[in-house]
Image (tube, rainbow, N blue to C red):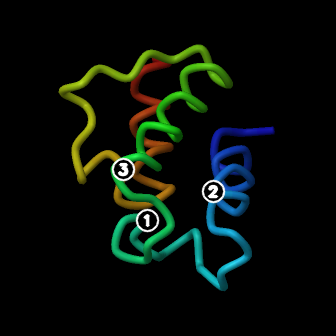
């Protein structure tokens, strides 16, 4: 399973069955994740993909949408 599918599965669980569009919705603005949720997401990413997210990378540009997160992860694996 690729980054996107695993992230979507994790975020769907975090969304508590809210009707959301994980491809287009802002994760923060839609209420899917908050500051605590971002920390849970980072822990998931680090354990699931063995990728370390630096504090400086915890920016809205990197975590606004699933595609933004995938871009960050792909840039760290290359």
Residue drawn at the location 24% of the way across and 24% of the way down: 55
Residue drawn at the location 50% of the way across and 43% of the way down: 70
Q: Are marks 2 and 1 in contact (CB under 8 Å)?
A: yes
Q: Earlier in the sequence, mark 1 or mark 3?
A: 1
| Residue, disc 3 | 63
Please state, as top left, top right, bottom left or bottom right, where the N terminus lies in the image.
Answer: top right
Q: Earlier in the sequence, mark 2 or mark 1?
A: 2
Q: Position of residue 31 (x, y in %)?
A: 44, 72
Q: Position of residue 29 (x, y in %)?
A: 34, 74
Q: Are marks 1 and 3 in contact (CB under 8 Å)?
A: yes
Q: Earlier in the sequence, mark 3 or mark 2?
A: 2
Q: Position of residue 17 (x, y in %)?
A: 73, 75
Residue drawn at the location 46% of the way across and 17% of the way down: 78
Q: Nearer the viewer, residue 31 or 56?
A: 31
Secondary structure of the residue carrying tag 2 is helix
Q: Nearer the viewer, residue 62 or 20?
A: 20
Q: Which mark is residue 11?
A: 2
| Residue, disc 1 | 27
């Amino acid at each position: 399973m690729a980054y996107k599918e695993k992230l979507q599965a994790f975020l769907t669980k975090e969304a508590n069955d809210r009707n959301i569009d994980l491809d287009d919705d802002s994760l923060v603005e839609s209420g899917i994740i908050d500051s605590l949720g971002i920390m849970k997401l980072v822990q998931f990413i680090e354990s699931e993909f063995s990728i370390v997210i630096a504090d400086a990378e915890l920016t809205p540009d990197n975590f606004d949408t699933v595609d933004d997160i995938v871009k960050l992860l792909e840039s760290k694996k290359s």
